[in-house]
Image: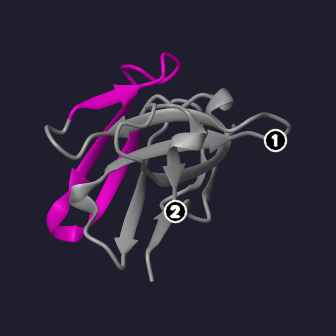
Amino acid sequence: QVQLVESGGGLVQPGGSLRLSCAASGFTLDYYAIGWFRQAPGKEREGVSCISSSDGSTYYADSVKGRFTISRDNAKNTVYLQMNSLKAEDTAVYYCAVRYPSGSVFRTGSYSHWGQGTQVAVSS
């Protein structure tokens, strides 16, 4: 069964850090581009970051550039999102998903096999 499972969310103070994991099962993740999205209450799901399968190119939303880093460990079949200098506005449920070949980087319709999400709360 093809599945993505996110983990690593939690409650953190402003300025703190978290590392999210997106573990794949049922397929080899290194053949696919993987994206991270987030959805805050009452807001649409938005793209956060993406890592390509071919050359490891990375993409970031302007709101997280310089603070978040996406990476992949093909041996562990896992993609990570390191989040530093967290802000209250980063509070959301974070999801990972598989991007269709040639799909738009931050368009939700370009992705499939969404995970169940992991909650990130940034608050003092």
Disc sitting over residue 74 in the figure:
none
Quadrant for residue 42, please give it: top right
Give me the C-alpha separation between circle 2 and circle 1. Answer: 22 Å
Disc sitting over residue 113 in the figure:
2
- Compared with 74, 80 (above or below) is above
Count the numbered circles shown. Answer: 2
Out of 108 and 92, give the one closest to the viewer. Answer: 108
- Compared with 111, 26 (above or below) is below
- Compared with 19, 45 (above or below) is above
Indicate the quadrant containing the C terminus: top left, top right, bottom left or bottom right. top right
Does the segment drawn in magenta span residue 64? yes
The reply to whether callout 2 and callout 1 are in contact (CB within 8 Å) is: no
Where's residue 97, x and y in %? Answer: 48, 54
Does the segment drawn in magenta span residue 71? yes
Disc sitting over residue 41 in the figure:
1
Out of 105 and 58, give the one closest to the viewer. Answer: 105
Side (left or right) of 9 relative to 35: right
Segment tinted magenta in the rendering = 57-83
Q: Residue at x 51, y 42 (%)?
A: 110
Quadrant for residue 39, please give it: top right
